[in-house]
Image: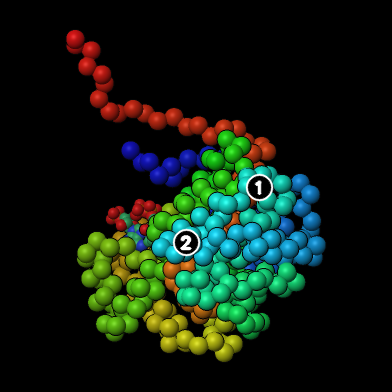
Amino acid sequence: MNNGLDDVVATETVMSDVDGLAGRLTIRGHSLDDLAASSRYEDLVGLLLDGFVAGLAQSEELAADLGEARTRVFEQLVPACAGLGPLSVTEALRAALAQLADGEDAATALRLVAAPAVLVPAIVRLRRGQAPIAPDAGAGHAADMLRMLRGADARPAEAAALDIYLVTVSDHGLNASTFAARVVASTHAGLTSSVLAALSALKGPLHGGAPGPVLDMLDAIAATGDAEAWLEAALDRGERLMGFGHRVYRVRDPRAEALKRSVQRLFASGGEGTGRLALAEGVEAAATRILARRKPDRPLQINVEFYTALLLEALGFPRESFTGVFAAGRVAGWIGHAREQALYGRLIRPQSRYVGPLPDRAA
Ligand code: ACO
């Protein structure tokens, strides 16, 4: 039985549409290409939550409220992060987020949006033995996230690259984490519970956990110096190439295109690591060729995770924090979907078909 629910339409939504055949992503009436070219993450938060969260401000007022929410999150949640040492970054993020009370109001929604952007840099710094850095409520969301990571202002080109990334991953149809958020929202458990469920789903390597392994793959290929041989051997061992393939796209993932352009611009603006970009472009070309030959019935091209790995590495995020940075973008989509489900949906309760043994009635 196909239990991946591939062809099941489980809900109607005004949030986003993934056209897997045309390679198009539409978010609340706008194409991803337009949004990635001109929007700040703050604008996407307003767009995704519009009409779903009562009392949410718009535009510059919303950006200011989000800055305030970063400050509240830092004061409220970061102190407890110091005791989360043995957990992975994503597990520590989940544990810290779980301190937030449930609610459906604008303050809860904005704190949840702000939380990963504040907590991921704080957790990374604590793991390095460095003190967390407080947010600057007046700064742009992406620029502030980089400042909290590094302790110094990022170049405008770097802040713009992170903004494009957060916008690009902000929503994407009924992916596994968003579906998890909606299932929990359908019980009216509250927004924090929905976001925690979504983050747990995002953590897995088949969803948001892939960009770290993309870098592991690039490192391994760089060490051998022979991309073709390494890729063929990995596929011979039955391994999947991280950052390739997608459940819905049958052509190139449009997010991968937007992020590749962004990485190219970032490196052209004076960032380090052009050798890494050349390696990645070479691996992309070789893997696309090899996968087309080995899996002719299944178009397998790069997905959003492939150039995410390069972008986040170039911005200074350690690879174990990549899933948390993904959450910093996707959280607005999770909240919009959760509110849409709570307002307009019903309890999600599908059926299963029992195929196990029947009770022995002989006696
Ligand atoms: N490398 C090699 N082969 C692959 C890959 C890959 N990355 N992806 C799929 N295939 C092959 C499978 O082995 C299978 O071949 P078979 O029919 O000969 O057994 C065929 O393509 C179909 O695979 P499915 O498992 O049915 O594809 P599914 O739609 O379930 O997979 C997924 C989608 C999970 C993303 C998959 O492509 C994958 O594992 N990719 C690598 C991990 C990754 O990049 N994850 C991030 C996804 S993007 C995101 O969630 C944000």
Relative image position of residue 355 (x, y in whole percent)? 30, 28
Residue in the image at 31% along x and 70% along y: 290
Marks 1 and 2 sit apart, C-alpha to C-alpha, by 38 Å
Mark 1 in CB contact with mark 2 (< 8 angstroms): no
Q: Secondary structure at mark 1?
A: loop
Residue in the image at 68% along x and 44% along y: 104
The front one of 57 and 30 is: 57
Relative image position of residue 226 (x, y in whole percent)? 27, 82
Q: Which residue is mark 2?
A: 84
For ligand 1, give the image quadrant: bottom left
Residue projecting furthest to the left = 363
Q: Is residue 76 left or right of residue 219?
A: right
- Quarter of the figure with the N terminus: top left
Which numbered tag is attached to residue 181? none
The amino acid type found where label 1 is placed reads Val
Relative image position of residue 240 (x, y in whole percent)? 32, 62
Decide if residue 284 is in sight here.
yes
Q: Quadrant of residue 76?
A: bottom right
Residue in the image at 52% along x and 59% along y: 93
Q: Is residue 126 left or right of residue 59?
A: left
- Quarter of the figure with the C terminus: top left
The front one of 129 and 310 is: 129
Using a 10 Å C-alpha cutoff, classify the residue at mark 1 as few (fewer than 14 neighbours), some (14 to 19) or many (20 or more): some
The amino acid type found where label 2 is placed reads Leu
Q: Quadrant of residue 285?
A: bottom left
Residue 47 vertical placement versus 308 (above, below):
above
Residue in the image at 44% along x and 45% along y: 6
Q: How many marks?
A: 2
Q: Which residue is mark 1?
A: 14
The tag earlier along the polypeptide, 1 or 2, is: 1
